Image: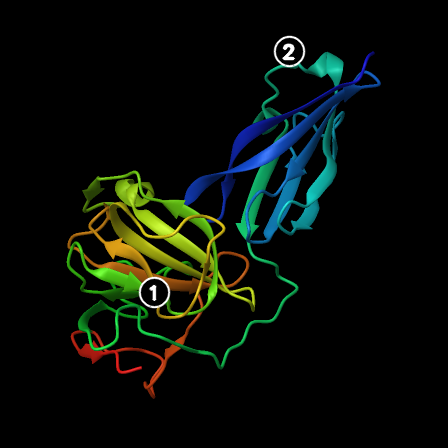
Amino acid sequence: MKKLLFVLIMVLTIGWSYGQTIKTHKEIANDSVYLDYINPFYAPLELKLNALDSTKSYVKVKPYGILQHQDTLKHALVIPIEKVKDTSKVDSNSFIKFKGNFGDPTTDYDKDFRYNLPYPKGKKYKIIQSFGGKFSHNQPHSQYAIDFGMKVGDTITAVRDGIVFFVKEDSNEYCKTRKCVDKGNKVLILHDDGTMAHYVHLDFEGSLVEVGDKVTIGQSIAISGMTGFTTTPHLHLVMYKSGGNSIPFVFKGQKRKKLKQGKYYLRKH
């Protein structure tokens, strides 16, 4: 059969909270369909693939890969062409289970780094939920998150140098249940040690940066809002390592890792 080459976009589940898009390259040759996965993000991507019980007798799968920006997992999925009803619409989810996480698990992060508070110098804000908060900071992905009581329209600044790898700013919805978790606007930034900062609940069209931008510590990056799963306007700030688990972090000028709920913190540096 004549070889055909083209690129498509697939939406697959990455991480714990929301779908992301990765690129898939499809090739038809030797009576088989070959799918490559390509990482378009500026953050590393860890992929885990497993054939479904119903397909493992005939598909070939590369079960694991760590992809840097624009890296390709070549021939990640190979399907006999007679098993594909429509080669123009190959749905990977019909053949494999897919899981992806941002981050490279082979890297060690800097546990001693001191972050800036996420607002302009001279400003102070109240902590409305800290590490281990009972309302929503009680899962591995949120255990070490901090909620700052910022009003809609307030300026959010970068806590560390990095590169923007994801922006969502198209939502103006919120609700008081987890059904709105995907409605939260956000900016995600990769740091040079592999950690990733998530700034969440931003205003509609509230990002001041774009994917691929390099940001510096203290730079204005977003406008605070009230979108997603929330009961009040605030900034939800959390740091991740690979695997989708949150990690503790310390701010400059603070002796304790855990900021105290109900207390105001002034950014002096």
Q: Which of 121/252 is in front?
A: 121
Instruction: Name the residue at 22% across, 45% down.
Output: 177
SS of the residue under disc 1? loop
Q: Mark 1 points at which residue?
A: 145
Query: Relative to 47, is 120 on the left or the right?
Result: left
The image position of residue 99, as x and y in percent, is 56, 43
Q: Name the residue under label 2.
A: 85
Q: Is residue 263 above or below residue 37?
A: below
Query: Relative to 121, is 7 on the left or the right?
Result: right
Instruction: Name the residue at 62% across, 14% down.
Output: 88
SS of the residue under disc 2? loop
Query: Relative to 236, is 210 on the left or the right?
Result: right
Q: Which of 155/189 is in front?
A: 155
Q: In which quarter of the image is residue 149?
A: bottom left
Can residue 135 be seen here? no
Q: In which quarter of the image is residue 234?
A: bottom left
Q: Is residue 230 above or below residue 88?
A: below
Q: Which colour scheme is used?
A: rainbow
Q: In which quarter of the image is residue 178?
A: top left
Say few, some or many: other residues with alpha carbon within 10 Å of mark 2 (under 14 / 14 to 19 / 20 or more): few
- Figure quadrant of the C terminus: bottom left
Give the Cα separation between the discs numbered 2 and 1: 45 Å
Instruction: Name the residue at 28% across, 77% down.
Output: 259
